[in-house]
Amino acid sequence: MKLIINNSDYIGATSSGLCMLHCFATPFIFLSQSAAINISQEITFLWYLLNYMFLLISFIAIYYSVKNSSNFLVKVLLYSFWISLSALIINEALLLFPIPELYTYISAFTLITLHMYNLKYCRCNDDECCTN
């Protein structure tokens, strides 16, 4: 657990980056498999399940990053963009509204940027830090 707490910004940036790559690669992987006769439904389900795994890891990373951040705006933006990314992924799964994939990439990229900014400029590494 201490590993997650101490490296939450690294974990969050990596998770968001992998999520973005996952979203970018999905159409290409399924297009390349469209010629295959036997596409397993389990593989498809597991591939889409990765979306939610990335969201869970990202939420945990944001939770601990916010606890160790001294910048209120960064705290709010981390949660806001996580909610945005979650809503976009859920919308894509349920096909509620036709929203371009670009917004998912923007949300994921912004989370990466916020984690890196927080790590460099806002991170509190001791009990003396004023995080209120």
Image: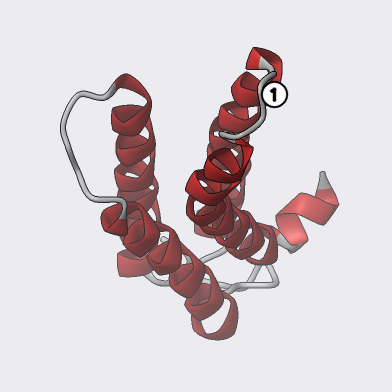
In this view, the residue in front, 100 or 82, is 100
In this view, the residue in front, 66 or 12, is 12
- Residue 67 visible here: no
At a point 26% along the width and 24% down the height, the residue shown is 95
Q: Judging from the image, what secondary structure is the residue with disc 1 in?
A: helix
Reply above or below: 130 against 77: below
List x then y, in percent, for residue 122: 50, 77
- Residue 41 visible here: yes
Q: For mark 1, does the 10 Å Cα neighbourhood hold few (<14), some (14 to 19), or many (20 or more) residues? A: few
In this view, the residue in front, 71 or 19, is 19
Task: Please say which color scheme the image uses.
Answer: secondary structure
List x then y, in percent, for residue 28: 54, 50
The N terminus sits in image quarter: top right
Most extreme residue toward the bottom is: 121
Q: Is residue 90 left or right of residue 54?
A: left
List x then y, in percent, for residue 98: 17, 37
In the figure, residue 41 lies in which quadrant? Answer: top right
Q: Is residue 74 left or right of residue 24?
A: left
At a point 56% along the width and 34% down the height, the residue shown is 34
Reply above or below: 88 against 42: below
List x then y, in percent, for residue 38: 69, 18
In the figure, residue 124 lies in which quadrant? Answer: bottom right
Q: Report the residue marked by disc 1.
A: 43
At a point 62% along the width and 56% down the height, the residue shown is 18
Reply above or below: 118 against 93: below
At a point 57% along the width and 84% down the height, the residue shown is 120
Amino acid type, mark 1:
Ile
The C terminus sits in image quarter: bottom left
Most extreme residue toward the top is: 41
Reply above or below: 60 against 43: below
